[in-house]
Amino acid sequence: MKLIVGLGNPGRKYEGTRHNVGWEVVAEFRRRFGKGGIRSKFQGELAEAVVGDEQVWLLCPHTFMNCSGASVQPARDFYKLKHEDLIVVCDDMNLPTGRLRFRAKGSSGGQKGLEDIIRRLGTDAFPRLRIGIDSPPPQWDAVGYVLGKFDAQQRLVIDAAVRLAADGLADWARGGVQYCMNRYNGN
């Protein structure tokens, strides 16, 4: 059993924002592999998917980004998951728009949702898939930037990255994070 967590913020005003790219990836993955409907559980939206013979739970926390761990920790505990069977999908301002980066573990890199999950799980030793959203222009503050929407050109790049990320998550469910690091972390 696996758990894929897409980070984002609930509410219509956050749809399509840079910070919600994790939710977009989970929605694409669910569209392809989903089984059944969405239910409210663990302070978020939970859905089931199947990849080959692997059962995969999809979780989108509704705790707002900075409190994502309040949703992830109870889900991990309920399903009695090992950390390598959990992956978090989130945005990353340190990567160019659309670049994917799988990691087996590591720091939050300043991503507040990851930071809260690390704090609540008591470890940074769980896989994550970061999706580049580029850094803000000099005149923008970071919060305004991540809560802003992609321009038309960036949207095209992100849409392709979301599809590729969903492919990557299917590969992660079947083959693990090392396989995905080798396959998806290049240019």
Image (cartoon, rainbow, N blue to C red):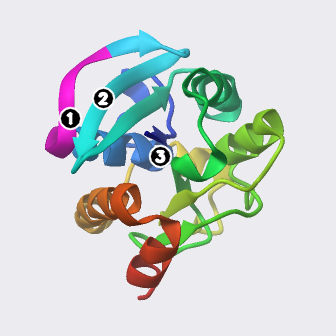
Q: Nearer the viewer, mark 3 or mark 2?
A: 2
Marked residue nearer the N-terminal end (3 or 2): 2
Q: Earlier in the sequence, mark 1 or mark 3?
A: 1
Image quadrant occupied by the N terminus: top left
| Rendering quarter of residue 157 | bottom left
Q: Amino acid at mark 1?
A: Gly
Query: Which residue is located at x 15 percent, y 45 percent?
Result: 32
In contact (CB < 8 Å): disc 1 and disc 2: yes
Q: Nearer the viewer, residue 157 or 115?
A: 115
- Residue 3 is situated, as x and y percent measured from the top left of the image, at 47, 39
Residue in the foreground of this view, choosing between 61 and 183:
183
Image marks 3 and 2: residues in contact by CB distance under 8 Å = no
Q: Is residue 96 visible?
A: no
Q: Is residue 10 above or below residue 17?
A: above
Q: Residues within 10 Å of mark 1 (few under 14, many from 20)?
A: many
Residue 13 belongs to the span the image colors magenta? no
Report helix, strand or loop for mark 3. loop
Residue type for callout 3: Gly
For label 2, the residue is 48
Give the numbered dot on residue 148: 3
Q: Give how far apart the Cα atoms at labels 1 and 3 are.
A: 29 Å
Going from the N terminus, do you reach mark 1 or mark 2 first? 1
> Pointer 1 and pointer 3: residues touching (CB < 8 Å)?
no
What residue is shown with label 1? 34
Nearer mark to the viewer, of 1 and 3: 1
